[in-house]
Image (cartoon, coloured by chain):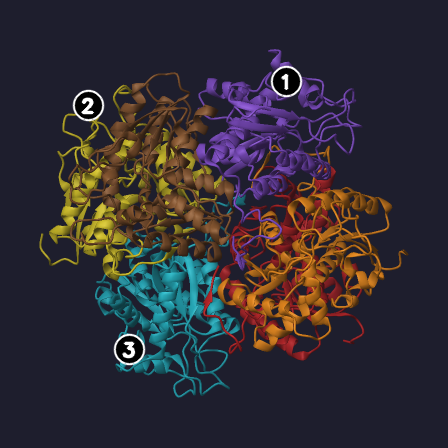
Chain colours: A orange, B red, C cyan, D yellow, E brown, F purple
């Protein structure tokens, strides 16, 4: 990686599944180019990387098995497994921002703490979408899938202090393939159908839930939860526009990229008071909420 | 203005004072270059404009008199007077973002409404600082001056829904020159002293208030209120760092610029539901908070 | 105006439309008596003015065109244009309270600041309704029309700190006549139908939305948004009562009048800390939320 | 009581102490005129009653003993004992509003429920002050005395939903005379000293706490807790004004009177949804917060 | 009562109705054993009392008439009437916790104040359910009946600071028998039908409302309002489980018992700052929210 | 472990340090009896375990090094490392509750998710203290040490939704021994001094901060953050009582034990909606906050 571009980013996936695994989607395995793995095939982010030198790290091999992360337990495993990658990247001096991929942002707070020590900002997909959404409208709603991920994401909304700005999390109820449930109609199949121009039930449900969020929950912006529904962004925004709803639809990759650029531009990463080092020079007698 | 840069911004001041006026500071009059008027002499923003084609508009001549805006009444006058400039700029097709200068952001919400009709984002100094600050720390405090401006700003915190994230507004109690109060030790004199490398009481007070905000009010980030204290940013951040406080200090110009870039990058301006047109295609039966 | 009555009020409209304008309703033009212009033809307020000496000011001529204010931009123009009238009225010594007409209360905060300097309370229609509603029930909902006005009003709820007490804003979706949209079925026609004893779709929709607000949004009191739906008050309250809903329905004129009287009785206008003068005797180092 | 005045009010004390009791202050016993008992000797309310026909009821004899109510237990006893008086007054047809005296407003919610059945508004001292204070400033603080009353009052702030608007309750730490504690320097002695023009430690402490509330807690309005410190209103407001603090100081009697008038003027008492009858015509499947 | 068990509890009903009264249900009269009166016939609490020495007090005879408490007024009467029983029980030295029966917990705060003086914890049915529910899920909803009780309960949610955790109060709209309304289909009849294994409309409605609370209001736990619907607990939980909803359903008796044990185990009752004595050793200058 | 006791608990430490490590305190290594390791030498919990069959698991060996966990990064490692122990314990069928030791409760939410699948409640030290504290007083404050742990704990307050009930986190500013900082005066030395009856600076600072929390931050209950300050409980409570402050001081072990018992008694663990399984029978279209 050379130094002649302003931005030098490392993208890190939350986990990677071994090639040929039973439940692996091609975007979770290591067989594609870095552009493909960044899902440029369907995410509108290529132009955002024109002025960026970037590397792609597939993340740790999922330590719990060969399927996509879904439960809190699985999230905790990949969070811990991703941190050494973050630390090494920060220490390498090669990057001026780290972008954590994955909708549930496992290890995000810890990565910001690590980044702070190197003055390197770290952005992630939930954090970025929520902050940007709250600039664009009074309230936002999240379109997501799988009940267990919804409730994991629920805690991210609480953690980032957006309970008053988040109208709802709306579940379109697809699943990841998973041992014991192989026959499920998975979200990946829906994505592929949509990309081929076929009717996708996932798109239909997303439209229904987005409109319900707008009409019932006060949503003025739509965001997307799990990274495996980020592909819905262009389909959903288009459909809503056709219906006359002038509603921004965000997805996590572009949001995390533009936020990382913003941090780099401004020369900030995080407050040393929010993420203190183990022996900070100054300490506060009290913290308030 | 050519089209070969990615960003085409117009900066608009809230008001301009006629040259030679009794209470006019050089940055409020039209005698300087646009770089000077953007306060590049002391704000660390030059590098942020490298990839920006930009124009500078001095804003409307203050309709109420030849002194800087301070009261709510005066803010209302300049807010209304600035809107035709915003509308004309949007309609010109020359810009892909408008940046409103001035700490109190008069006419900001109205300008976003106008911008929405042209799909042009509008950013401003209070909004931008508050949103960025809430990404960097749990709470932020605002350093500002003049009691009346503090309370005007108070309403901006409420408007942008940051009452839970704002620890306090801290007043360093200087004033703008103003009829009947000409002898006041004004904030402009303090700025000039500091820029000349002399001791400035404004800096000293800002340090005291920032530390109090950190130690007592939970502030983890410091922002600046009126644009006439934005010059404090570098002085204050340096002093805090010397004391061991690792606290980001934001100011409005750089914050508004990087946020405008982020909006342009992402291709968003605002939700059409938050800023509907006069006859939107879709409407909602209910809005909730 | 003589001094022998306890209350000496000036009513100020937000704007006046020139007689004969294409989009002017008779209540927005200057052709009626002051009693008519105060809409005593249908608002139940005559008895509230028995002990009041009062004048009526039509407000500034709408500076943007010959139609009723609707957008934020238009509101900003009339806000600024109304302030000199408020200032002159306060300075005249003739009044002990100012009542700002118009649902969206353009210039209200600024007018309170002006009033404060003369120790004269200023009341307005949104502020008054919200405060009174919160005394009568746990939550209130607002019946309003036009999407753009709804969202303008949304900000008033935020500004006056009632987001937790406001169940919803409910839109009955009529419009003001407006250039380019002359054939719209306007709210004024609905009012006239209802006053003639004919069926009005606006009344029907208001009943539907009020019941929805009660049953779904927790509303225990109904308030009305734009002053052009204040006429709904008696119709709506009666219909709800007939259905068995014991729900107070407020409108802005009577609410603003009784609140103004209360302020005069108590000898208060506003805190000098909320609305400081430009050089207050005392100032506070910090403000908190 | 004749019908020729607009307002027909009954004032009801929370309790009355038998004449000659060991701990009785003259305002808690029945030996004075109704004007004296309404504390017109020192409260600035005479002019508020010019257009009011009014009666005064001393309230129930304190059922727990011959000292002033202080504990929650004692408050519960007088609350229950006051309700039959309220019911009888409402049923008599003589009054168009009931005003409950006493700072802690025992039985207020229940009395509003009773009043609702007769369409008679009931106001009280804490409720009225809090609502009016929130119209005058962003935040208010309460000056009160005795620790146990402070915490009783704390619950009133929660009940009336003012936790975000109440900066603090400030204790000046005097006591009521009480068995076993007869020698205490009581608040009544302080009142008498102040009324005689002597220095009163209670006034001094109130000034200190009010200034602390202003400077530290964000108070922009001061209210008074127990009715036995309402006399502080004029002393405190004057002292603050002399210091340059333009801060309204409210007390409960005048606040409850002007609010009662406002309710009568507007023809409202309370929402039937907040205070339903035992078999309301309509009911709601759900209530939300 | 002997001392050889760890827990020595007194249960106190809010009121007792005289035998043979027109509107009395057998659980409100004194004709049953203490086990029956504690509703062990249908509540799953027997095992909770294995290690408890316990007495049962029927509470005060309803002072207002021979029907169950429903209005705020009636609640105030029984609250006051129950306090002497609480005080006597605490003073007797026989108990190490007091459990107040009745869903609306009349006199609870006052009883905690009394208990504090003896270092004896007091628990009650609404308080206990709300606290436990907030440990089990993000939000809870309350199933209750009668409109007037719903709104009384609404205030308990506010008082105990659970407005953000309570999704809704859902009304299944049955009534207590009551003079003038004897023919009502009362909740007691529903209970008896259900206990006999017959179809109960109350159960059906409770299922409908619980599912609505889950699907619409965010409820993740169900609690029960009035003690006369506590019998629904087992029926409702079973039905929800059969439908696939893994939702805890709480009722007040078991919740209050386990919380009382927890307090005894931990050796705590309440903070002396929340419930100060009439002359506490220490006092605070300020209280904040 | 036999089945003849009602409660069968497993205590699991967050991490264990290898014997003889440079920075290991005896309570973090495996050289003591299980009673000692549960810190019965100084925590008042022995009586709480009389009716409990219990095992003690030292937790995973700290994967990052031989010092106590402090940073977010270190917490993430031990969180992940503890989960297999939790899962195995649940699957073993030996326990009816799991108690996670350690103040920062790494892996708590994930462990509750695991426990839910086995219907086994999991309690932890921060969660338990916060919930109990909010039953005892209006607000609580946390005494903790080390800046970095304070901010980690801050997030736990947010996660468990106690920002409105938590007055402050107060830092007494000691440290754990740690590579590069071996000479620090550590908290363990303070504990040992106090247990030997010597003056401990940690106790003195804790008293100062607790009183400040009471007097300034509204704390009515004190809780303790990191488990390495739980020993302060008895010292602090005694000192406060001597000063006249009747304030409960909680610590995590006893709180987590009594809460675990309460869950077992009531037969609940957590809502299946808050912690859904990977393929729940029912799912919700929307989640709200």
Q: Circle 1 sits on which residue?
A: F36
Q: Circle 2 sits on which residue?
A: D22
Q: Secondary structure at mark 3?
A: helix
Of C274 and A73, which appears nearest the observer?
A73
Residue E259 position in % (x across, y down): 43, 32
Residue F63 lies, with reference to residue A194, above or below; the image says above
Labels 2, 3: one chain = no
Quadrant of the frame with the N terminus of chain A: bottom right
Q: Circle 3 sits on which residue?
A: C36
Q: Are marks 2 and 3 in contact (CB under 8 Å)?
A: no
Between marks 1 and 2 in the image, the one whose residue lies nearer the viewer: 1
Residue E91 lies, with reference to residue D76, above or below; the image says above
Labels 1, 3: one chain = no
* Chain letter, disc 3 residue: C
Q: Secondary structure at mark 2?
A: loop
Q: Which residue is situated farthest in the right direction here?
A: A2
Q: Secondary structure at mark 1?
A: helix
Residue C94 lies, with reference to residue E87, above or below; the image says below
């Amino acid at each position: 990686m050379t130094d002649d571009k302003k931005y030098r980013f490392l993208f890190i996936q939350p986990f990677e599944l071994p090639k040929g695994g039973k439940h692996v989607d091609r975007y979770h395995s290591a067989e594609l180019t870095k552009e493909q793995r960044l899902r440029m095939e369907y995410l509108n982010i290529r132009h955002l990387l024109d002025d960026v030198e970037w590397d792609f790290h597939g993340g740790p091999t999922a330590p719990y098995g060969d399927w996509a992360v879904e439960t809190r337990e699985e999230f905790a495993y990949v969070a811990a497994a991703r941190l050494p990658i973050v630390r090494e990247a920060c220490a390498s001096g090669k990057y001026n921002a780290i972008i954590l991929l994955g909708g549930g942002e496992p290890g995000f707070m810890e990565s910001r703490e690590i980044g702070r020590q190197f003055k390197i900002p770290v952005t992630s997909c939930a954090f970025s979408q929520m902050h940007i959404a709250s600039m664009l409208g009074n309230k936002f709603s999240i379109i997501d899938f799988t009940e267990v991920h919804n409730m994991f994401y629920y805690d991210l909304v609480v953690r980032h202090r957006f309970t008053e700005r988040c109208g709802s999390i709306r579940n379109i109820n697809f699943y990841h393939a998973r041992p014991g449930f192989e026959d499920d109609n998975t979200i990946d199949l829906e994505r592929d159908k949509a990309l081929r121009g076929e009717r996708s039930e996932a798109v239909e449900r997303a439209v229904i839930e987005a409109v319900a969020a707008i009409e019932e929950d006060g949503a003025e912006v739509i965001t997307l939860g799990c990274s495996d529904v980020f592909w819905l962004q262009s389909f959903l925004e288009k459909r809503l526009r056709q219906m006359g709803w002038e509603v921004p639809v965000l997805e996590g990759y572009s949001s995390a990229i533009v936020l990382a650029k913003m941090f780099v531009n401004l020369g900030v990463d995080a407050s040393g008071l929010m993420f203190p080092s183990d022996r900070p020079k100054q300490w506060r007698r009290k913290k308030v909420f």
